[in-house]
Amino acid sequence: MRLVLLGAPGSGKGTQAARLRAALGVPHISTGDLLRAAVAAGTPLGQKAKAVMDAGHLVSDDIVLGMLEQRLAQPDARAGFILDGYPRNLAQVQALDALLARMRQPLDAVIKLRVPSAVIIARTELRHRAEGRADDDPATVRKRLAVYAQQTAPVAEHYTRAGTLRLVDGVGTLDEVFARIMAALGEAPAAAAAR
Ligand code: AMP
């Protein structure tokens, strides 16, 4: 299964991707996690990305694509993957299409978790207190939501036009949202999107 998970920051993509990984037996590849690992390791790339991430902006397409390409080349990704946090803009959609075409590994599904902004703001405040992520402070979350609306919303529109997007209500318990995603993966895209 080759799956892309879309949704605003704090929509629950990471949490659900971890569960999907266990259920589907394919790795969870989060570009945010790859970048945070590079920052923690203090690599030149991580040092470059840190300030951009802390400000809530997008890291350059070239850097992220290079990291993703390396990760997808690992043997465990041959069975498939759950991509979380990529693509984030239309240029990344094109880059992913080209990369997967070259690898002869087309996407099977794109899921978008729908969560209202008020819920996102409450969730990221909790995460900020629990995990201390610098980019979860309320002002930076507002910035990240604006970047999402401007640059990432068109990604969902692209996959809607392509007929591959399945919309899932992301409000509810972890179990409820997980069950909805699994149901959407087993359903025809048009039926799920119409809900
Ligand atoms: P996330 O954990 O997905 O919310 O990502 C945290 C931060 O990492 C984002 O706010 C961006 O600064 C950066 N980032 C993650 N994925 C990407 C991407 N696909 N393109 C550009 N920047 C990204």
Image: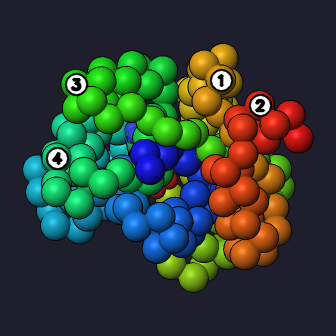
Real-space CA distance between mark 4 and mark 1, rounded to the nearest whole angstrom: 27 Å
Q: Amino acid at mark 3?
A: Arg
Mark earlier in primary sequence (3, 2): 3
Mark earlier in primary sequence (3, 4): 4
Report the residue marked by disc 2. Answer: 190
Q: Which mark is residue 175?
A: none
Q: Is the Cβ of the residue at disc 1 closer than 8 Å to that at disc 2?
A: yes
Report the residue marked by disc 3. Answer: 102
Q: Is mark 2 within 8 Å of ligand 1?
A: no
83 versus 41 height, above or below: above
- The one of 73 and 57 positioned closer to us in this rendering: 73
Real-space CA distance between mark 3 and mark 4, rounded to the nearest whole angstrom: 12 Å
In this picture, residue 153 sits left or right of residue 29: right
Q: Which mark is residue 73?
A: 4
Counting other residues with Cα less than 10 Å from the Cα at mark 3, is it few (<14), some (14-19), or many (20 or more)?
few
Q: Is the Cβ of the residue at disc 3 closer than 8 Å to that at disc 2?
A: no
Counting other residues with Cα less than 10 Å from the Cα at mark 1, is it few (<14), some (14-19), or many (20 or more)?
some
At 28% from the left and 39% from the top, the residue drawn is 64
Q: Amino acid at mark 1?
A: Gly
Report the residue marked by disc 1. Answer: 163
